[in-house]
Amino acid sequence: MNRLKMLALAGLSLLALTACTVNKNEAAKDPVTAAKDLSVAIRDNDFDRLSHIMVPPDLYAKMEDRYKDQQKNAPAPSAQQNAQFNDAVTKFTAPGAEDKLFADIQPQLAVMGPRIPMGVAALSGYAGNSIAQNDKMSQAEKTQATAVLTAITKWATTAPLADPDKAKQAIKVIVGAARDLKLTTLDDAQKMSFSELMQKFGIAFGGMRSALAVYGFDTDKMLDSVTTAKKSGDDNTAVVTVSYMLLDAPVTADVQMIQRDGHWYSADLVKSVEDSLAKPANAAAAPMAGPAMAPGSDTPAMSAPMSSDQPSAPANSAPSPASAGSNGGG
């Protein structure tokens, strides 16, 4: 019995040691796991990890250098910018912020309620036409995009977007996320490291996802449903099929993966970041990104400061598991 206990303890110790030596910010050494890890990082709101595993280390270093250059060249915030920043932070973090924000939007909820179905139909039609007429998308990509649009349209048509109680819940979530950001002054925000900035994005993104969940858009369920399987490939390139359930609708996409120094990355994400870095750096970084709107309300969610010319692949890769680069149909 003692020998069994010792063997079990030794096994657990070995597993713990192995776990401690794994670098979560290192892309996987096989394409299937690498593709899956992108969705896991999004599921965990871990944008710091996502920014590392979506590109090779040398490209990450260039992203970080670009960000540092923009910080160095950015002018000091003006008095007006500081005041606007402080007002925004106070609006979402002060005691009683939830009640004040709800009082601001409550009169608009009754007005927007009857308009939602018509607005959703109009936006859906416009988006559908844009997909159909996009000559840069393959037919498979159009099929996937249409499947996503259909699922979201169905949800938006029936979701309680104008419900006051839901609005209160969503505002509470957004205010909580704003407080978790722990933003103080604009000057401090602009001095954040690239890693810290990614962590702030993760907090803001998590707040947005939780607010969506209030209205029945369960992104946890979607991301938990992600499966990946190798479709084809060789030592340097591969196609991985990514499948998931979006609002109970099946979506499938083929993601192109490439191998760099023994690790695998989304080809589209790598190209996106390379293209972004190839553009001339903007000497004056924008001090604050525009606020993101909470679902079903006019309440903006706090967002971390970001340059308008900063490599934006982490943020752009987050909306869906397949957005890391797809070429497949649903």
Image (spheres, rainbow, N blue to C red):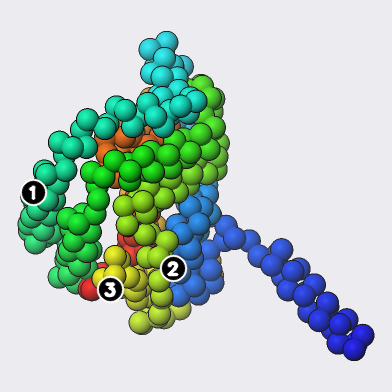
Within the image, what quadrant is residue 283 found in? top left
Q: Nearer the viewer, mark 3 or mark 1?
A: 1
Image x and y of residue 234, in percent: 41, 81
Disc 3 to disc 2, C-alpha distance = 13 Å
Q: Is residue 148 left or right of residue 65?
A: left
Q: Amino acid at mark 2?
A: Asp
- Asked if residue 132 is positioned above or below residue 74 in the image, the reply reads below
Q: Is residue 178 left or right of residue 151?
A: right
Disc 1 to disc 2, C-alpha distance = 32 Å
Q: In what element is the residue under mark 3? A: strand
Q: In what element is the residue under mark 2? A: helix
- Say whether disc 3 or disc 2 marks the residue closer to the N-terminus: 2
Quick one: label 2, few (<14), some, or many (20+) residues within 10 Å?
few
Q: Residue at x 37, y 54 (%)?
A: 213
Q: Amino acid at mark 1?
A: Met
Image x and y of residue 49, in percent: 53, 54
Q: Are marks 3 and 1 in contact (CB under 8 Å)?
A: no
Q: Amino acid at mark 3?
A: Pro
Disc 3 to disc 1, C-alpha distance = 26 Å
The one of 245 and 74 positioned closer to us in this rendering: 245
**Residue beneath label 3, please?**
250
Q: Residue at x 14, y 46 (%)?
A: 116
Q: Is residue 268 left or right of residue 31?
A: left
Q: Is residue 199 left or right of residue 167?
A: right
**Residue beneath label 1, please?**
118
**Residue beneath label 2, please?**
224
Q: Residue at x 44, y 68 (%)?
A: 224
**The N terminus, quarter of image:** bottom right
